Image (cartoon, grey):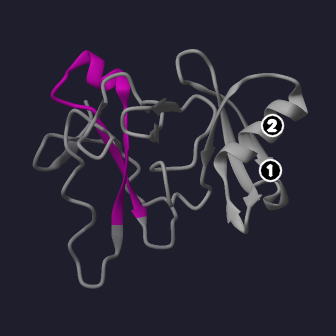
Amino acid sequence: MASFAKLDSNNIVIEVQSVHDNELMVDGVENEQKGIDFLNNLFKTNDNWKQTSPNNNFRKQFAGIGYTYDAAKDKFIAPPRYNSWSLDSNDDWGPPIPYPSVKDDGADPVVWYWGYYWNEDVYQADNTRGWKATKRNMAELPHSDTATYDWNGTAWEPSQ
């Protein structure tokens, strides 16, 4: 099976369809245009389709609804996770504040780790902050310390 992303006039993915390999083969080789023709004949349209790979082995990543097809780079780009995030040189979305470098208690073996996440509202209120965390035991259970912490760029500190 092959997958095809239907694009709107702004190259935004609005639908993804699967096409059986039998509909793609030309002399034993998969042919994207044959899949596009099959879909347009099936739906009686002349839509803009691009093949996408669930294995992420071409066009960067599998296209989902809301992704953008960048024709110049011939790849699909995911929608931004948050308004403040920007694309890096690999066309991946990244936060304006680097990921926290302190990930666990530093013990050997590790007893607990930081379950951290981005909070866009915190960042919008104070653009020096955005990462929040709680402590988690290695068994994925809440830690006895149930406080929420903020990343200050070098360490976790209790939220105000």
> Where on the picture, by quarter, is residue 147?
top left
- The residue sitting at 27% across, 24% down in the picture is 123
Disc 2, SS? helix
Q: Dot 1: few (<14), some (14–19), or many (≥20) neighbours within 10 Å?
A: some
x then y, percent, for residue 159: 27, 35
- The residue sitting at 58% across, 28% down in the picture is 66
Marks 2 and 1, how far apart at CA: 8 Å
Do callouts 2 and 1 mark residues in contact (Cβ within 8 Å)?
Answer: yes
Q: Which residues are magenta?
A: 113-136
Numbered label tally: 2
**Quarter in which the C terminus is drawn:** top left
Q: Amino acid at mark 2?
A: Leu
Label 1 belongs to which residue? Answer: 19
Label 2 belongs to which residue? Answer: 39
**Quarter in which the N terminus is drawn:** bottom right
Q: Is residue 90 left or right of residue 35?
A: left
Above or below 123: residue 51: below
Q: Amino acid at mark 1?
A: Val
Disc 1, SS? strand
Q: Nearer the viewer, residue 127 or 141?
A: 127
